[in-house]
Image (spheres, grey):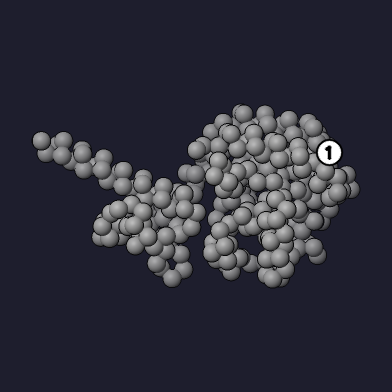
Amino acid sequence: MTAEKANARDGASGIDRVLELIEAISRTGRALTAPELCGILGLPKPTVHRLCQRLEAAGYLAREPGGRHYGIGPRLLRIGLDVMRGGASAERRAILKSVVDEIGETCNFTALAGDEVIYLDRVEARWPLRLHLEPGSRVPLHCTASGKLFLAHLPPVRRRSVLAALELSAFTPHTIVDRASLERELAEISKAGHSLDREEFLLGLIAVAVPVKDSSGATLAALACHAPSARLSLERAVGFLPVLERAARRLAETLPE
């Protein structure tokens, strides 16, 4: 074998290892230690340490507080969000539009981005009174329907870590700013399968959100409908849950596997 072919083979092997490591962390849904990655990948500890250090330096991985666990870094998060925003966007927009046509209120397709919610897509209702947020906008976790939904569906260890780092700012008199109360709310959301915003982010605005899940049942995104409370009550919004849940199943089919 020539030196050129050997280098090409080694380069391909290195790329495979990097991708397998990133996939392991992404699929597990939590930060992993180097020994855990060694067990999953079947690679020697020095190799895993070297890969993690390089990926961390490049921004693809980030170490959790304490320094032993590697999680998704900002550059990897951006790639994932760009894939979700770009893939099957026309099909997703058509699904959102059909929901807006049926319900008559604005619908959002959202994802978890670190400690915030990011709007991946959005179809506005045909009303003069509405909240205008462009795709790419970010809103808090603890006081929005989508945000609380994502928190409720995080693995327990990850949820505790995120909650411990969140600043529970009061956006309205209805915002939940007590951690114990928020944890009780998340437990209720987990049982109910949907989440509500009771004017917690903006006064006069209510919302309901349902999860968009993959084939394993993991929550990858959310579908939310919001409206001024003067036009849509929470009771009526909850009545639209079957419409939202059907659309969420259709949206799940547009997500990359």
The quarter of the picture where residue 52 lies is bottom left
**Element type at mark 1:** loop
- The residue pinned by badge 1 equals 128
Residue drawn at x 71%, y 40% is 245
Compared to residue 182, the image places residue 145 above or below, namely above
- Quarter of the image with the N terminus is top left
Q: Residues within 10 Å of mark 1 (few under 14, many from 20)?
A: few
Residue extending furthest right?
230
**In the drawing, does residue 155 fall left or right of residue 14?**
right
Residue drawn at x 68%, y 70% is 179
Residue drawn at x 81%, y 35% is 104
The front one of 82 and 196 is 196
The front one of 66 and 28 is 28
The answer to whether one can see residue 147 in this image is no
Q: Position of residue 135 (x, y in %)?
A: 63, 41
Q: Position of residue 20 (x, y in %)?
A: 36, 47
Task: Please name the amino acid that badge 1 sits on.
Answer: Pro
The front one of 47 and 73 is 47
